[in-house]
Amino acid sequence: MYPDPDHSFVLACQEAGSGGLDGPFRGLYDRYKDRVYNVCFRITGNASDALDASQETFGILYRKIGEFRFHSRFSSWVYRIAVNASIDLKRRQSSRRFASLEWASESGDSPGRSQDVLDENIEMPMASASRHELEREVQLAITRLSPKLRAITVLRYVENLSYEEIAEALDISIGTVKSRLARAHDALDRELGPVLHKHYLG
């Protein structure tokens, strides 16, 4: 088995047991907080949901770290939990939104505009507006992918994981990684082709 750079951190947490967040787990949290938040933000599409998914991720890690046996890299386990927490959060929101729309339809009320995943970015400063607009379009295109394609795109192009690392993190084969990425490329090309033409050729 390959050496895991997090081995000593994880062992310290396991030996400490329920030592609280100010014990060894604090070091592990500091080591992963930015990466976890980044993954959660890219998958959920906004800061509020990313914070919720991040908290859920570290809550699971804290409760279950004693069960980790290094059958995979610890980082792969962290990514898997973060991806699942983000996807589960969005699915729960979709279910609630669907129920709300059904209620509004039955009551005759017209539902208000749903919270767009990019609302928090719309109020960004006007400086470099064109670049920010492109960033918003890219993020929006990612959030329009299916959850599986969204996760694999984030891990590959935001976190820069290798095919092998993605396969381990998502517990899928390398062939599945490649096929999902190919589908994600096609979808993003369709979404972003006109946008890129507007910004760079228009």
Image (cartoon, rainbow, N blue to C red):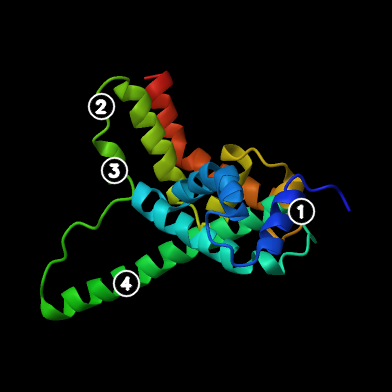
Residue 103 visible somewhere in the drawing: yes
> Which residue is labeled 3 in the image?
120
Whichever of callouts 3 and 2 sits on the residue coming sooner in the sequence is 3
Measured Cα–Cα span from mark 3 to mark 2? 12 Å
Q: Residues within 10 Å of mark 4 (few under 14, many from 20)?
A: few
Q: Nearer the viewer, residue 164 or 50?
A: 50
The residue tagged with tag 3: helix, strand or loop?
helix
Residue 184 visible somewhere in the drawing: no
Q: Which tag is nearer the camera, tag 3 or tag 1?
A: 3
Q: Are marks 3 and 4 in contact (CB under 8 Å)?
A: no
Q: Residue at x 50, y 57 (%)?
A: 146
Asked if 142 appears above or below 169 in the picture, the reply is: above
Q: Name the outermost residue toward the bottom.
A: 106
x and y, in percent, of residue 13 in the image: 66, 58
> Which residue is labeled 2 in the image?
125
The residue tagged with tag 2: helix, strand or loop?
loop
x and y, in percent, of residue 25 in the image: 59, 54
Q: Residues within 10 Å of mark 1 (few under 14, many from 20)?
A: few
- Write down the quadrant of residue 63 in the picture: bottom right
Give, as a three-letter code, the residue at label 1.
Gly
Question: Which of the numbered marks, if any, corresponds to residue 96?
Answer: 4
Measured Cα–Cα span from mark 2 to mark 4? 32 Å
Whichever of callouts 4 and 1 sits on the residue coming sooner in the sequence is 4
> Which residue is labeled 1 in the image?
175
Q: Are marks 2 and 4 in contact (CB under 8 Å)?
A: no
Q: Name the outermost residue toward the right.
A: 1
x and y, in percent, of residue 72 in the image: 77, 57
Asked if 114 appears above or below 194 in the picture, the reply is: below
Q: Are marks 1 and 2 in contact (CB under 8 Å)?
A: no
